[in-house]
Image: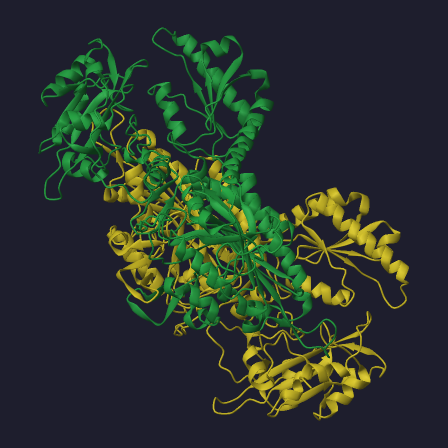
Chain colours: A yellow, B green
Amino acid sequence: MSLEESFAKLCVNPEADAVAVKSLVFKPKTPKSATPVPIVVVALQSTSTGSGLIASETATKEPRLARDDLFGSHFKCPSAKAFHLGYLTQSESEFKLLLDDALTKIDDSKVLQLNEEKFMLKSQLIEYLHQYSPQIVDFSQEVVKKPETKKPSAQSTASQAKSAALEDAKLIGITVDKKLDFSGWYQQVLTKGEMLDYYDVSGCYILRPPSYAIWEKIQRWFDDKIKAIGVQNAYFPMFVSSRVLEKEKDHIEGFAPEVAWVTRAGSSELEEPIAIRPTSETVMYPYYAKWVQSYRDLPLKLNQWNSVVRWEFKHPQPFLRTREFLWQEGHTAHLGQDEAIEEVMQILDFYAGVYEELLAVPVVKGKKTEKEKFAGGDFTTTCEGYIPQTGRGIQGATSHHLGQNFSKMFNISVENPLGPEHPKVFAYQNSWGLSTRVIGVMVMIHSDNKGLVIPPRVSQHQCVVLPVGINSKTSDEQRAVIHQKAREIEQKLRASNVRAFGDYNDNYTPGWKFSQYELKGIPLRLEFGPKDMSQDQVSVVRRNDNRKFTVKIADLETRIPEILEEMQNDMYLKAKDLFDTHRVIVEEWKDFVPALNKKNVILAPWCGVTECEEDIKDSSAKRDDGEEFEADEKAPSMGAKTLCIPFEQPELKEGQKCIRCDKKAIQYCMFGRSY
Amino acid sequence: MSLEESFAKLCVNPEADAVAVKSLVFKPKTPKSATPVPIVVVALQSTSTGSGLIASETATKEPRLARDDLFGSHFKCPSAKAFHLGYLTQSESEFKLLLDDALTKIDDSKVLQLNEEKFMLKSQLIEYLHQYSPQIVDFSQEVVKKPETKKPSAQSTASQAKSAALEDAKLIGITVDKKLDFSGWYQQVLTKGEMLDYYDVSGCYILRPPSYAIWEKIQRWFDDKIKAIGVQNAYFPMFVSSRVLEKEKDHIEGFAPEVAWVTRAGSSELEEPIAIRPTSETVMYPYYAKWVQSYRDLPLKLNQWNSVVRWEFKHPQPFLRTREFLWQEGHTAHLGQDEAIEEVMQILDFYAGVYEELLAVPVVKGKKTEKEKFAGGDFTTTCEGYIPQTGRGIQGATSHHLGQNFSKMFNISVENPLGPEHPKVFAYQNSWGLSTRVIGVMVMIHSDNKGLVIPPRVSQHQCVVLPVGINSKTSDEQRAVIHQKAREIEQKLRASNVRAFGDYNDNYTPGWKFSQYELKGIPLRLEFGPKDMSQDQVSVVRRNDNRKFTVKIADLETRIPEILEEMQNDMYLKAKDLFDTHRVIVEEWKDFVPALNKKNVILAPWCGVTECEEDIKDSSAKRDDGEEFEADEKAPSMGAKTLCIPFEQPELKEGQKCIRCDKKAIQYCMFGRSY
């Protein structure tokens, strides 16, 4: 008899008011040579199972929620998600079992919900667990804090010294705190929210429907904008021969170390290795030269939606640094420079629009320094975002003016419109790109310890409709009416173009569903129960701030779209406030690093000299208190880079010196630690 | 002084009623050891410059329009397109110059239009050409046919024995005849129509805006359809590790010889080579196994729009056989087989819809034989098209039912919904794909010797509005009014969602523009001149059949969309008639090959046995008259394959034998030479 079959014999049919029970597995810290003994905690869902108490009760160090590998090695269970108590029978080595005292005290005839699918009589569960000699723990006692033995990292603060594990996290939900372990949180919020999954080729990720749907919304919006200014879409091959790739030297220098090379097809070695495009300048421009024969062929404005490959060897991060990523790349050629520059700015505004109007993410627009600009171009404009938890800036999207550098290299030229007696004119070119990185920035900024928070304008789904308040006393008829009405509400919303869906599954409790849809970041939850029905209303909860409204059913078509827009706006304002208050003006060097350490980005008067820029980066990589900076692989560059020279400039004082050197400042520059 | 400068000195300003003059360059056939002497022909646009006459006048063999390489080597001119008579000065070796007698006879004071940009007094041109000792030729004399020395190819017919070059082709237009040199015609119609360009990595092509726009229309239509049945879009990485790729043996066997391998990144050799996906079954299914934990996770229906790479070593052909191509691939997993099969058929109907409703291409739906089905699947459904000029079938798109083959391999399974006492259930899977091949099929079927013909529903632009009838007698005021009115017509059409644009450029004659937009396949040409203005009407010409209408301006918003729909429908009916009359029922083997040779596909009673299928293919690869089949690299497989077993079956006679062997026929099968 299989595990599933034998365990199922103990189970009973689902019951609506079953008591939710969680089973968590912890792995304590052990020396590398020792085999860790897992700790299985079975407790009421409502019980806080603090890791401090677990540590003291089991005399172990720093128990952390176990990862898939432990579930596999110890319980032969494919993943944490698949785990249930039936797997205990498969353990061939030791584990500890802690049983929540509160759980032992409830009525023996109660039905417990062990996970989505499994329900069991309380008496039966206790009997089953008995064979593993559980230790009864009263989790309501005060947590006994053991002194932390782990050396705090450079970024640690006093409060971070405690475990980043959320004290009351359910296994299925987010189990680390955004404030305490940002990178662990980011990974969980993406994977558990089903935005993304890790892939077995390092640095590549799977974009699951909720994230791809956001990308589609962005595509539609941006595509309409660029088509309105005369850009056309096209598709160029992903392959580029080495000869062509290497044509523009400055340009290729930046990409060469990251280029992926195809050298074999089937079992044949290729005569010449072929590169996968890291970007398409050198792919496209030879054809621009061919197609542009007369000034009437200009402007030539093409865009493509594709994926590019940059085989970075740095620590990859979902959306932010990936070896393959989706983007659009626009490449345009113009007769006049003014026209080209106007377009660069127009596109930058569109990019800012993607962030601010769609993703509710505030950005600062500006120009990159010579050091940070796109290699081979004249200048680069950028919109820069800010991640409050890490205090780091992040490049949002860039729009480059290439001047005539590429057109001279590739001979994209036309006869002079003034007449053939004038010299031929090389085209002025732009290139501009926006990638799926935007989704990562959006997630980092808005999401929280309950999971994803997604701005309504881009969310795949905007509302979930849930019947609530149905319990054992509800008559079948009443239940049917509530479900029917809830379905009508869903239909009504869809008819007014709200992306709504309903969840009428009786096997899950409303509380379970609430957590699920919070985890997935559905913007609005519409609850509809007997009380709502009697008052012709729906209860509405906003995901971003848990604010609750009641909306009359007659007003749904107008009010729900309004609430969605209000929510979008509030999310933007909240993020903007955080960026605005953490973008500080600093005029003296002594205040520079302390301001950085307070998770700010800095506006500082600056001389514009590259050597000074490098000096600032080096000097800010150490702490001002003289303590050596401790390298953190998750923070590969902790010195402050120039993020951009903002277009919106504070007024420069007469004779203002550069923040770092003795030269005269020529502008304010935005500095920050960055991604 | 540069060439352009000195030649420009001879030129005059553009004039609206200039006489169009063409300059063509021919290359005669010469032994490989000899250097060919180009023949430059300068003639009135309206003069037919037959290659037969050119041959006899110059005592050369088979003069053909020269290609870019000759323009480069002989005249230092970048391309045929860029060529004008100024380049004659750059020739360092010999060429022959033929001058149209009719051209010499027109008035010396006439302005001639040499190409888009260059205008010259007739007297000046004659003087300029004088230095090259032109030979005056009267092209109106009867063509002196020389006996053809070239051995006719296997496909040649009596009529094909004459040159495929269009006798009156303009250099900028299509210069080969669709009937006589289909593959040369196909290449020209795509490149000169600006659908596609050849790329410097063999087997890869550039999709230019007019073809990509068609793809976008298909995407939008199909995407809406599949989303309505619950499919969601996602994006999986383009890379797959060899270990995973090779998991499903049957499947990978079909793709292994064509897989492109990345072995190097920057200057580092990868530890393990990584494949570029040839299709994504093995990329996606390990994650399906992970995500599908309960039957409530089914059905799982994902689709992606991406590009895949199959490094074929056969002769590549734009759209039809390319090493990278764009497609969508849908991959779904279902609990029940009926539901899965229903979806396979639903998707096949959508595919047929793409062809029939959007591309005006008739298809036959059916099932592939065991030999031709997708490796690793249970069965493959397909829609099959037909190319009249070659008489060959072409696979349109396929929708596969994979059964449980992949789910067992990858363990995509759930607990039995009947209860855990029943064995676990492996998912039933489908995969289905439609690629940019559809565009090639569309072009082959509808386009003609004037260039592209594109069905209005998918065409990037639907109408071009052209002011006409403006000549030297037209007053500036009149001209302005006509232009103004034409612009209003354009606006009116755009306001009623007709994809219209106007061409108000005075430097081109209407005739020049007509040819241009015919070449590009703009479905409707709207001409508006003084006569139309006086009668409040527009003259409308349909690209597909040159039918001309007049439409009252007041009726434009209703009538133009109607005409576009009528045109769409007529294109479909014409293609359907050709397919229907070339899909013939053959019941005896002796009629099989003769029917094939008449460019038919064949419906024949068949036993369903693979060995018989192979025998039919081998036996039909030879001509029935006993003559050996002559291999043609453009027709790599001239034996008849099974195209499909059509769902719509002729009635099988009692006791009907197989067309080829002695066994009983079990169904009609569609056979044909194919792509």
- Nearest the viewer among B671 and A73 is B671
Residue B57's quadrant in the figure? top left
- Nearest the viewer among B506 and B388 is B388
Task: Locate the C terminus of chain A and report the quarter of the image it occupies.
Answer: bottom left
Number of on-image labels: 0
Q: In the picture provided, is B285 more to the left or to the right than A534?
A: left
Q: Is residue A170 above or below residue A461?
A: below
- Nearest the viewer among A592 and B269 is B269
Q: Position of residue B304 (x, y in %)?
A: 52, 55
Task: Locate the N terminus of chain A and report the quarter of the image it occupies.
Answer: bottom right
Rendered residue at 27%/26% (across/down):
A417
Q: Is residue A528 above or below residue B409?
A: above
Task: Please say whether residue A649 is visible from this viewpoint.
Answer: no
Rendered residue at 64%/78% (across/down):
A83
Q: Position of residue B274 (x, y in %)?
A: 39, 67
Task: Please say whether residue B468 is visible from this viewpoint.
Answer: yes
Q: Is residue B196 above or below residue B301?
A: above
Q: In the picture provided, is A323 more to the left or to the right than B135?
A: right
Rendered residue at 56%/32% (across/down):
B569
Q: Position of residue B72 (x, y in %)?
A: 18, 38
Q: Position of residue A573 (x, y in %)?
A: 60, 50
